[in-house]
Image (cartoon, helix red, strand yellow):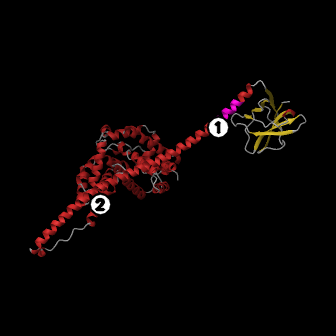
Amino acid sequence: MQCDEVQELIYLEAAGAEDAAARSVIRDHLAKGCVICQAALAEATAAAAQLPLNLPPCPPSESVKKELMRRIKTATPLSQSERTSATPEPKRMPRKLLLWPLVISTSLAAAMFLVAILSLQANENLSREHLKDLTALASLQKSFLRDTARLSQLSHQMHDAVAMEKRKILSLETKLAAAESLKAMIGSPALEMASLHGSSPMRTAWGRVMWNDKMKMWKLCVFNMPHLPNSKTYEVWMITSGGKKMPAGLFNTDYKTQSALVTPAVPPNKHEMAEIAVTIEPAGGSPQPTGAILLAGHIG
Amino acid sequence: MTLSKEDQHNDYELMAALAGGDHDALSVLYDKYAGVMLALCRRILRDATEAEQLLLDVFTEIWQRADRYDERRATPLTYLLTLCRSRAIDRCRSRRSKHGKWAVNDFTTDNTMESVMAPGQQPAEAVSSGEQGHLVRQAMKTLTDIQRKVLELAYFDGLSQSEIAEVTGIPLGTVKSHVRMALIQLRQKLRKED
């Protein structure tokens, strides 16, 4: 499960409203070592733990504290009792064995033992310092890992955002180039134009076809033509004076504006073309029209 | 009760001393937080005597298992309140299981302030105690009524998301989003004030 989905559940867990399934999902995810979700859970839990501070505090009666202090006098912290039981006291020598001839050798041994203890003590101090450094290092390492994970996530997000912006720029550049080309075509004195009119059942449909022989450009604008489902397509036809119909491209209209700007594929023998028309065909188009002509105009 | 940085630092020292078996550390910790912990117990259990008994048990557990506290996971106050809530909810659920399923009207009465006040305690006095409490109250005021209600049903009444949906008549998905938005807002407000 992704962090986003887990973090949805984390707030429920922090507030104590999670059910068994949500708890299991969170536990499984955290067991994988996700430091981001661990931090999110800690933050959410800390926020929820502030809720009791919204309540007016109630001072407990004196007897509660008295009873508590009485209890703890007899109850040793488990951590301590475990430590105590783990290191039993050394057995003492029976008194009758402490004889004078042993005193000197014992003192000597004690002196040597003391030197050894002092040396061990010094080592222990060093070890303690070392342990402290190691703890600090572990903490730094953990924080480093957390930051690295966050940076990695941010880096992925940024990478995706940059890719998306690049795609947008490319699309805008294409549109701009098309718009500039159209502007040049329309602005040229060689521009020719004809109107297209709708027929039943699309009487309100209309269009304009523009062409510029010098620039070898054709553009067809259509309006009031409904957006077609994926199984259908509009097909443009160039029709010769003899009535021969030649396919000149497929298009669909924008579903909001019900219009389209199309670049028809004009055949090489364009001077023979007398009419341009549009029909509805099955998706992928047809070699010859199968539907009725919905929009047509004379270009000859 | 205030929670300055220095106080929080002292709390960490107190927890360390507690783990070392220092009776005085427990006494200081008790004096600082028993009031808010008892308020929490009373709010959840709605029974003054049972709440004091639970407070005693919780502090005994804190003393006996001081080694459980891990400062990397939570501040001492978060740890104390989370443990306290958990034990109170456990007790409440066990009581509910003995007396049968809860009823919707168990949660329809407003039991936020007055119900948890000590006898003779005035609302104004209660509200004035605690700088952090003041900040939390301000933050809570920014939540919508339904966000606050949902959060209280979860945190204080120990209801699961589906139980909250049943009690309030709100769709399950909306319960989730209320809890999430409320906690995010609370966290942001308290962080701003930090």
Could you tell me which secondary element the residue under label 1 belongs to?
A: helix
Residue B46 covered by magenta stretch? no
* Frontmost residue, A261 versus A254: A261
Q: Residue furthest left?
A: A100
Which numbered dot is residue B185?
A: none
Q: Residue furthest top?
A: A189
Residue corresponding to mark 1 = A171
Count of numbered badges drawn on the protein: 2
Residue A171 covered by magenta stretch? yes
Q: Is residue A32 visible?
A: yes
Q: CA distance from mark 1 to mark 2?
A: 67 Å
**Amino acid type, label 2:** Ser
Residue corresponding to mark 2 = A79
Q: What is the x, y in percent for residue A280?
A: 79, 40
Q: Which residues are magenta?
A: A170-181
Give residue A80's quadrant in the image.
bottom left
Q: Is residue A15 visible?
A: no
Q: Residue shown at 14%/74% (left/top)?
A: A94
Label 1 crowding class (10 Å Cα cut-off): few <14, some 14-19, many 20+?
Answer: few
Q: What is the x, y in percent for residue B46?
A: 36, 49
From this view, report whether residue B142 is shown above or below residue B92.
above
Give residue A77's quadrant in the image.
bottom left
User: Which SS type dominates the magenta stretch?
Assistant: helix
From this view, report whether residue B144 is shown above or below residue A124.
above
Query: Who comes first in sequence, dot 1 or dot 2?
Result: 2
Q: Chain of mark 1?
A: A
- In-image side of A177 versus A114 (left or right): right
Q: Residue shown at 41%/59% (left/top)?
A: B98
* Frontmost residue, A221 versus B132: A221
Q: Residue shown at 36%/47% (left/top)?
A: B43
Q: Chain of mark 2?
A: A
* Frontmost residue, A100 versus A221: A100
